Image (spheres, rainbow, N blue to C red):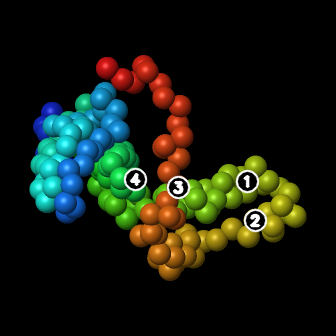
Amino acid sequence: GETSYGNTVTRLINVVNNSDLATSFQFLVDRKNMFSFSSTEGVVQARNSVRIIISFNPLSTGNYYERVFCLIRNHKLLYLDLIGTCYDEVTKPLPLMQRHVEVFRYKVIMGIHYKKKLAEEAEGDEDSLQDLEMNTFDEEAKLNLEVPIDDPNHVLHKEMFLENDSTFRD
């Protein structure tokens, strides 16, 4: 959500169990974050749902993004993209949207940002620059719109492999 500095935005999500058996869930969250959950784990009874409140309480202006993974017993890994923007009287950043996140993640996966970095390093070396064949922004945007990125198999889950740092936990 979008909020002014010092305020909190809340959203409600439902964890739904359509099966005939109870199942457990757990959101893998960083407790010292701008986004907080009313409950990060629990059990959803058969043919029932559990409501969870997610709060966005930023400490400074800017755009915030976090991908939170949800483990559900006997189910594939799910994720939830949390996006928030905080502004004040002086600073009002353009709101970050889901599409921005998807395009950025796709570019990282396809190596487009890496290719630009290589081009900067190869400046002056004509052979290296020709090999990179830089795309214009419009060509990259067209490429991003043509390739479906709804499929979770196209998303790089590098967050799963980050080393667990206990300094960020309570």
Q: Amino acid at mark 2?
A: Leu
Q: Which is more foreground, mark 2 or mark 4?
A: 4
Pointer 2 with pointer 1, Cβ within 8 A: yes
Pointer 2 with pointer 4, Cβ within 8 A: no
**Crowding near the residue tagged with mark 4, few <14, some 14–19, many ≥20 C-alpha atoms within 10 Å:** few
Q: Amino acid at mark 3?
A: Leu
In the displayed structure image, the side of residue 69 where residue 133 appears, left or right: right
**Crowding near the residue tagged with mark 3, few <14, some 14–19, many ≥20 C-alpha atoms within 10 Å:** few
Determine the CA span between mark 3 and mark 1.
Answer: 21 Å
Determine the CA span between mark 2 and mark 4.
Answer: 36 Å
- Residue hosting label 3: 156
SS type, badge 1: helix
- Residue hosting label 4: 77
Residue 143 picture quarter: bottom right
Which residue occupies the foreground of this view, 147 or 68?
68
In this rendering, is residue 28 above or below 105?
A: above
- Residue hosting label 1: 118
Q: How far from the left and from the top, in percent, is residue 40?
A: 24, 37
**Crowding near the residue tagged with mark 2, few <14, some 14–19, many ≥20 C-alpha atoms within 10 Å:** few
